[in-house]
């Protein structure tokens, strides 16, 4: 009898060891940022305004450049204020990027003209039809602002890059994927790895290189020595891009995954907040199909392509009318994150038509 009991305990211990080798998604992750609380009393904090006019340099016509939608913002802290860099659409669905400023992170004043838009320049071939979308802004080690954005020509979305010293005057550097075999590849959403320095998020070199997550179905990576010229991370054998995060059948991220804000480096790992969409089938049955919600993933601090952990569920999802109904229904799309006044402010697009904020305590 004693032998049988001992044998049973050994078998149970072995089973337990095997289970411990896999991430336990049921546990509360101490590496996650949050929990976040939506600021319901003031949300949405930004709405479209058809009274704000701008003379488009390409057509020469006056347009209500944010008359239809405002959405998907990035954010940085500059001069002690939150600068919200947001996407806006006119009635023709052309996207431009605007700027709004806040002293408390909650109440914003918009600038009258967009700060980034299609012009008669070398990038017009990529930006003429759909415009410039979904900005993400970080700072280089020298303080210069680096903007990743999507240029859309009506057929193909291309991940592109620009830089600035003041957030208003930008130099366009062209598509991130310059390699001829990737130049016409659909690419979006560049989240550069950063390290927090007080309220600033500075691009972080790991093993002599800067790193970026990108993509809007699977996530891929690129690396750079100067934040301007980038190379795709490829499999050496087949010379194809390496997927580092992918959709999961049966989960909220069963349809696609896409980076949120920058990826935050810490000695314990790199935290990537990511957006995800729920598939039409083999999905999370608790959410409507095609719902956009957000989760978090942890990558190795020295091997940024190596995933260590991933949340089982989402930490933010559409549950308010302005999130559930809009240009696109059932959308919370996170893209802006700042450390401000001793807490986290997370800015996100709702229904692809408005912008909201959630906050979380800072406990790292």
Image (spheres, rainbow, N blue to C red):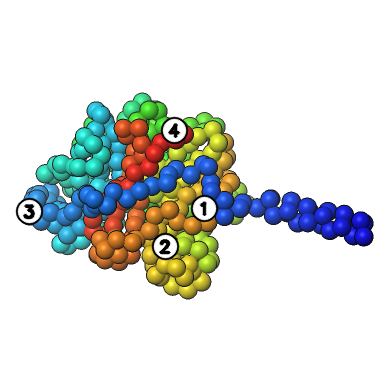
Q: Sequence order check: which comes first, mark 4 or mark 3? A: 3
For this view, does 57 lie left or right of residue 190?
left
Q: Report which residue position mark 2 lands on.
A: 277
Q: CA distance from mark 2 to mark 1?
A: 15 Å
Q: CA distance from mark 1 to mark 4?
A: 22 Å
Label 2's element? strand
The answer to whether the residues at label 4 and label 3 have Cβ atoms under 8 Å apart is: no
Query: Quick one: which residue is furthest to the top in this view?
Result: 142
The answer to which quarter of the image holds residue 200 is top left
Toward the viewer: 303 or 161? 303
Q: Report which residue position mark 4 lands on.
A: 195
The answer to whether residue 186 is above or below residue 137 is below
For this view, does 355 lie left or right of residue 185?
left
Q: CA distance from mark 2 to mark 3?
A: 33 Å
Residue found 92% across the figure and 60% down from its top: 1
The residue carrying pointer 2 sits among few (fewer than 14), some (14 to 19) or many (20 or more) residues within 10 Å by Cα, namely: many
The residue carrying pointer 1 sits among few (fewer than 14), some (14 to 19) or many (20 or more) residues within 10 Å by Cα, namely: some
Label 1's element? loop
Q: CA distance from mark 3 to mark 1?
A: 42 Å
Count of numbered labels shown in the rendering: 4
Q: Sequence order check: which comes first, mark 2 or mark 3? A: 3
The residue carrying pointer 3 sits among few (fewer than 14), some (14 to 19) or many (20 or more) residues within 10 Å by Cα, namely: few
Residue 223 appears in the figure: no
Q: Sequence order check: which comes first, mark 3 or mark 1? A: 3
For this view, does 92 lie left or right of residue 179?
left
The answer to which quarter of the image holds residue 360 is top left
Residue found 84% across the figure and 58% down from its top: 8
Q: Which mark is residue 51?
A: 3
Q: Report which residue position mark 1 lands on.
A: 311
Q: Sequence order check: which comes first, mark 4 or mark 2? A: 4
The answer to whether the residues at label 2 and label 3 have Cβ atoms under 8 Å apart is: no
């Amino acid at each position: 009898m004693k032998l049988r009991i001992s044998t049973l305990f050994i078998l149970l211990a072995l089973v337990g060891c095997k289970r411990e080798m896999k991430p336990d998604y049921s546990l509360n992750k101490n590496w996650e940022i949050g929990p976040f609380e939506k600021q319901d009393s003031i949300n949405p904090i930004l709405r479209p305004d058809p009274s704000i006019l701008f003379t488009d340099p390409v057509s020469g016509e006056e347009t209500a450049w944010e008359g239809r939608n405002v959405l998907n913002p990035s954010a940085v802290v500059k001069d002690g204020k939150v600068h919200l860099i947001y996407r806006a659409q006119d009635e023709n669905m052309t996207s431009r990027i605007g700027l709004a400023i806040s002293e408390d992170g909650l109440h914003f004043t918009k600038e009258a003209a967009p700060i980034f838009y299609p012009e008669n320049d070398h990038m017009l071939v990529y930006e003429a039809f759909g415009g410039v979308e979904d900005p993400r802004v970080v700072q280089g080690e020298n303080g210069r602002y680096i903007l990743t954005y999507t240029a859309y020509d009506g057929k193909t979305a291309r991940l592109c890059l620009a830089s600035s010293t003041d957030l208003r005057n930008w130099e366009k550097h062209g598509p991130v994927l310059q390699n001829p075999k990737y130049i016409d590849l659909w690419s979006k959403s560049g989240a550069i790895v950063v390290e927090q320095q007080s309220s600033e998020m500075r691009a972080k070199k790991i093993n002599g290189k800067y790193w970026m997550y990108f993509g809007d179905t699977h996530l891929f990576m690129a690396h750079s020595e100067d934040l301007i010229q980038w190379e795709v991370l490829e499999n050496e054998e087949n010379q194809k891009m390496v997927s580092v995060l992918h959709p999961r059948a049966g989960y909220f991220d069963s349809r696609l995954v896409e980076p949120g804000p920058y990826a935050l480096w810490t000695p314990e790992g790199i935290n990537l907040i990511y957006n995800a969409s729920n598939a039409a089938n083999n999905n999370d049955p608790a959410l409507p199909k095609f719902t956009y919600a957000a989760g978090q993933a942890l990558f190795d601090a020295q091997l940024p392509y190596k995933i260590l952990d991933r949340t089982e569920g989402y930490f933010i999802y559409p549950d308010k009318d302005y999130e559930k109904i809009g240009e696109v229904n059932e959308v919370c799309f996170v893209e802006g994150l700042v450390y401000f006044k001793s807490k986290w402010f997370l800015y996100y697009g709702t229904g692809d038509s408005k912008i909201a904020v959630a906050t979380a305590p800072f406990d790292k």
